[in-house]
Image (cartoon, grey):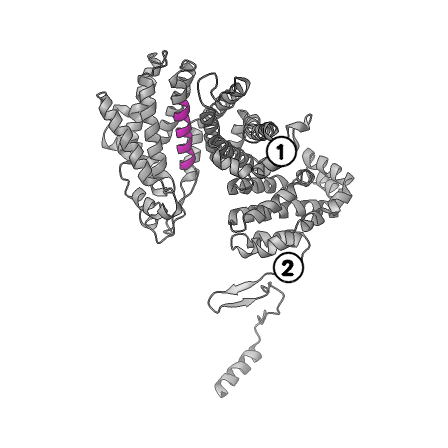
Amino acid sequence: ASSDTPSEKQIQILRKVCHVTSAMMTPRRASERDIKSNIKDKFMVMERLIRLISHFVEAMSKNSKNGNIDSSGTGSDEDADAITLSALMTLATAACRASERNKVAFVRALKNARRASDSAHTSTSSGKRCNSSIALLVKGLHTTVEAYKTATPSSSSSATMIKLMADICKLISVLCKFDDFRSEGSSAGTIGVESSMGASVSSAHDHVLEFNRSGVVPILHEITDIALTMNKDNNEGSGSGSGTRGVSEEDVVALAGSALGATRVLAVNDEIVQALVAVGTLKVVKLALEMGVEEVLLKDENNDKKNDGDVENSNKDAGSKLLSDPIRMQRQHLTSGAIGLVRNLCGNDEIKTTLCLGAKLDASTSILPMIMHGMKLYRENATIQEHGCGTLAAMALRKPANAMRIVQDDGPREIMLALRQFPNNVLVQRQGALAVRNIVSRLVANTNSGVTEASTNKGNNNGREDKDTLAGDESLEKNTDNLMNVRDVFLDLGAEVILRQITGRHQGSVDEAYAALRDLGCKISMVKYDAETKKTTTRVEMFGEVKSNFRAVYDESTAESAVSKHVGA
């Protein structure tokens, strides 16, 4: 990235190198993961990569300020810079995915480059230099959004900027989540990020906090809103697959899914969740679920009516349709990101009650029915089933009213079907068992304690009442018969067999299966396996159950007799 403007031939070579190198580091099948990981570990040009990204971000910013935009539909310098920048983002994403070492190297690359040389390419448009690679990405994202707004409708610039926004969002998602699960004996253990104990640690949380400080939340919300607005325009248009700005439906759905995926990985603490809610994320995520679920259902229904009117058969073949339709695959990815975001937002008790029960004056704003529809429509998607079960588990935690609503909306059936569908997926099994435990334990506990618990909470809350909890207690009091059968609802669906024979056999979900079976009232005992002796005991001894030989008071006569016996022997 020199100060001179690169020639067209150099740009073409750079793009080709980015595409080839990205393909070399992207595994297409499971058998390629190890060799691709080794190639990633040899990627040592992060500083050069970040300098190139900085150069083209600055070039886009200058072209946008100078008004060098595409008004003829034939392309512009800004378009060329955006295409090259998109290739660089794809390369960075391929290098950082599943490599903790490369993520940290990318984030630190700009600071390291400054130490090597005081380059003018690291300065912002206002004369101030970006603080880090993360700040540079946020600036690039903001510049792309502004370039999209100024682009002429139906021009090539719109589609170019849409793709660049999606690529930057994908890179943000990769940098803000831990996905390097290689064993300690692999190369990741020797050149990765290590703690003082020698184990590989994640930098995702630090990256999330830095992105939040850099102001990425409102930008991601604006991008999601752009995608949803364009989708609405496409639906209201001719239905030819291209909207009012000449962008394909597939690209629009891909942008919405990428933006929501980036938003989801940012929602790691209550401060960020509150910031997301403040910019209007609750409304956006509902629209995104409608885009990913309800529109697919409506289109399937209309197509089936045109063909043979057999809607039921079309629902059975939904999985095969999704595999053959790229747009449907993008909507599936969008649904996964939307439900995953809802799952993270449910870490806040007040927000999850609003999401589950809807607003106080409008229960139709509840997002729960669409989560149920998403789990039904994408039955073969393990990620959606995991996020769905995790969302139900989070909604039911500490909220009896939410748990009751989940039961009424046929949540137990969806949980059991997810557990049956993915018997070897530990993440699905764990979240499903947690959902069963949280729903059953909260409803049964509320039934046993009755209104007494609610009145006790009123007196012990220092004058501050939890209105949601009290309202839930009052509604549950009126449905005592339903509450008493909540265990039967799960047991009739085969919960005991699934939890014992499927969920309980995985080391990562055995504790959750035990808790769920216990709260379902099933006879259960813990089993302890000794790897050294290879013996199994049917129950772990609890402290206090076996009388200890420990003597609280020192008895001299007893000690002397023991010594004499030993000497005599």
Badge 2 vs badge 1, beta-carbon distance below 8 Å: no
Q: Going 52% across and 55% down the picture, which residue do you hit?
A: 506
Left or right: where does residue 186 sit relative to residue 524? left
Mark 2 is surrounded, within 10 Å at the Cα level, by few (under 14), some (14 to 19) or many (20 or more) other residues, namely: few
The amino acid on which the numbered mark 1 sits, given as a three-letter code, is Val
Q: Position of residue 11 (x, y in %)?
A: 26, 25
Near-viewer residue (272 or 140): 140
Near-viewer residue (386 or 251): 251
**Majority secondary structure of the magenta segment?**
helix
Bounds of the magenta span? 161-174
Q: Going 24% across and 28% down the picture, which residue do you hit?
A: 13
Residue matched to label 1: 311
Q: Residue furthest bottom?
A: 568
Q: Going 34% across and 50% down the picture, which residue do you hit?
A: 189
Residue matched to label 2: 524
Tag 2 secondary structure: loop
Q: Going 62% across and 70% down the picture, which residue do you hit?
A: 547
Tag 1 secondary structure: helix
In the image, which disc is placed on residue 47? Answer: none
The mark nearer the N terminus, 2 or 1, is: 1
Picture quadrant of residue 147: top left
The amino acid on which the numbered mark 2 sits, given as a three-letter code, is Ile
Q: Position of residue 114 (x, y in %)?
A: 27, 30
Q: Position of residue 490 (x, y in %)?
A: 67, 48
Vertical position of residue 167 compared to residue 479: above or below = above
Residue 167 shown in magenta? yes
Near-viewer residue (344 or 375): 375
Q: Nearer the viewer, mark 2 or mark 1?
A: 1
Vertical position of residue 48 compared to residue 432: above or below = above
Residue 233 shown in magenta? no
